Each structure stands twice: as structure tokens, then as C-alpha cells.
Image: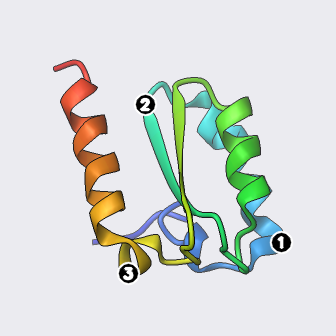
Amino acid sequence: MRRSWMHLAGAGDSRYTMELLPALRESATPKLLVWGEDDGFQKVAYAERFAAEIPGTALVRVPRAGHLPMENAPDQVARALAGCFNTMPL
């Protein structure tokens, strides 16, 4: 399976994170951002900007979590995902 450049964005250099905005703005798919507040690689300011500029985007900030909030706070991430899935239209 070939991965698109957007799938690899999280592993890329943080200097290119904001270059994702145009493509994400064009997508009508609802988005959930789950972001560690203490992420030293991808600053939470990026998430705040994404949430403000991309229609249909919700942001969940995970306190005391870094770049991999699913490892630092798996219960919080699971709750955020479950909440998102439970509210999405079928």
C-alpha cells in the first residue's frame, strides 16, 4: 500500500507542518486533532491554528502529554476517539 505525503506528515520535519493547511482546508471530512500540550516537536500552536483554519476540525488538548499522546495518556486519547466516533453522522 502506497502512503500519501499527508500520512507521513507526522514523521516529517516540523518546518513543513503548516504546508498541510491547503490540502486539509479542501477536505470536507470531519477531523479530530488529539495533541499533547507538551509536544516539543509539533507545538500545540500548530494544532490551534489547524483547528481555527480548517472547517469541521475539533481539537482535544491532552495535558502532560508529548508528541505521542497515545503513549502518555492512552485513556484520554481513547475517550476522545470514542466521543468523536459516537457523534459522527453515518
| Mark 3 secondary-structure assignment | helix
Say which amino acid is labelled 1: Arg
**Which residue is denoted by mark 3 in the rendering?**
71
- Classify 78 as above or below 82: below
Say which amino acid is labelled 2: Pro
Coloring applied to the structure: rainbow
Say which amino acid is labelled 3: Glu
User: Which residue is rendered at x = 70% and y = 70% of the image?
Assistant: 42
Mark 3 vs 2, N-terminal side: 2
Mark 3 vs 1, N-terminal side: 1
16 with respect to 63 (left or right): right
Residue found at the very far right of the displayed protein = 15
Query: How far separated are the C-alphas under marks 2 and 1?
Result: 25 Å
**Which residue is denoted by mark 1 in the rendering?**
15
Percent x, y of residue 48 = 72, 45
| Mark 2 secondary-structure assignment | loop
| Mark 1 secondary-structure assignment | helix
Of the pair 90 and 75, the residue shown nearer to us? 75
User: Which residue is rendered at x = 22% and y = 44% of the image?
Assistant: 82
- Which image quadrant is residue 77 in? bottom left
Q: Which mark is residue 76?
A: none
